Image (cartoon, grey):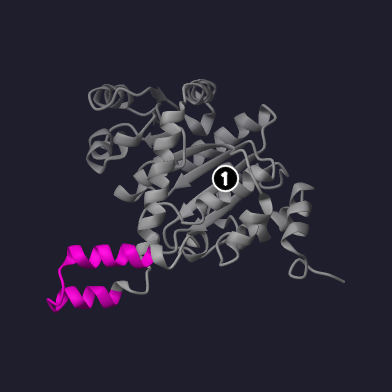
Amino acid sequence: MRTLSDVTIDELIAAARGGSQRATGRLLSFVESPRRGEVLDALGPVTSARVLGITGPPGAGKSTTVGALVGAYRAGGKRVAVLAVDPSSPYSGGALLGDRIRMAAHINDPDVLIRSVATRGHLGGLAAAVPAAITLLSALGYDLVILETVGVGQSEIEIAAVADPTVVVLNPGAGDAIQAAKAGLLEVADIVVVNKADRDGADQTVRDLRGETDVPILKLIAAQNVGITEFVDAIDTHHRADTPRRRSARARSQILSLAQTLLRNHPDLDRLADSVATGAEDAYTAAERLFAADVSEGRSSIRRDI
């Protein structure tokens, strides 16, 4: 009897399109491996699903917010995938979100996929495999991909390279508005949500935020589904306002981010670094040589190498 390990990628894609979560999981594992290119080639041209990014500081209630959003979009008949980007954990098949109470209601829904993705040393907050995972999930018929990042610092702003809109979730008080501004989160925010808005200080936090950003600011009590309808409306309004210029800017940021990782992993980097350290050549020349070597080697295999 054949097992999943015996079937071809084309067969896995067919099984995943037929509703097999196991096949989908296997394909997602492949896009985090050297077989990423094989999967992407087998998919052919794909129209991307909508991608929603959720970021913010730890404890802001991002997972609760994601859980509420999943419920709202499922009520509208949308198939939803959630990718939780973890900076250190191994690929865990969704345990990062799967054990959380707000997501538990969706675990057995065949039209909801919940998956954890480790960054695996990528410079920014997103795993290098995330763009490929989005392409795969789009090809498998998911209408919306939600990216939840762990919210630990400056690297989180990389979510804006693939998501539209990018939502920053904050809490009332505790200087969250100012800290988010200092961390650069508000620079990439398309929508800001003040979660746990039943707590003291919510209105003041909104006022503080209005002094830092001109994007829509919403109050939310995600644990009680209060404000979720308005939140979904704001997301949909933003999506309708998207333009080719903004899509091109996101694609440019994504390419530059992945290219930076490719160069960081280049086999000549250590040798060139030693050459600069000993004074044999300057950093400008070394940088040009590194880039030239990368191009001459035809390392368009970036989708496999990072």
- Residue 86: give x, y in percent of width and height: 45, 56
- Residue 114: give x, y in percent of width and height: 60, 49
Residue appearing at x 87%, y 71% in the figure: 1
Name the foreground residue: 180 vs 304.
304
Residue that lies at the very extreme toward the right in this rendered image: 1
Judge from the rendering whether residue 195 lies leftward or rightward of residue 286; answer left or right: right
Residue appearing at x 15%, y 77% in the figure: 280
| Residue 268 makes an appearance in the image | yes
* Image quadrant in which you'd find residue 123: bottom left
Above-or-below relation of 54 to 117: above
**Residue 85 on the magenta segment:** no
Residue appearing at x 40%, y 43% in the figure: 252
- Residue 22: give x, y in percent of width and height: 72, 58
Amino acid type, label 1? Val
Judge from the rendering whether residue 14 lies leftward or rightward of residue 241; answer left or right: right
Q: Does dot 1 land on a helix, a strand or a loop?
A: strand
Residue wearing tag 1: 82
Specify few, some or many for label 1: CA neighbours under 10 Å numbering under 14, 14-19, or 20 or more.
many
- Residue 158: give x, y in percent of width and height: 37, 46
| Residue 61 makes an appearance in the image | no
Name the foreground residue: 302 vs 150.
302
Above-or-below relation of 220 to 113: above
Residue appearing at x 50%, y 44% in the figure: 147
**Residue 281 on the magenta segment:** yes
Which residues fall within the magenta stretch? Answer: 270-294
Residue that lies at the very extreme toward the left in this rendered image: 279
Q: Main secondary structure of the magenta part?
A: helix
Name the foreground residue: 21 vs 227.
21
Report the number of numbered marks.
Answer: 1
Residue that lies at the very extreme toward the front in this rendered image: 296
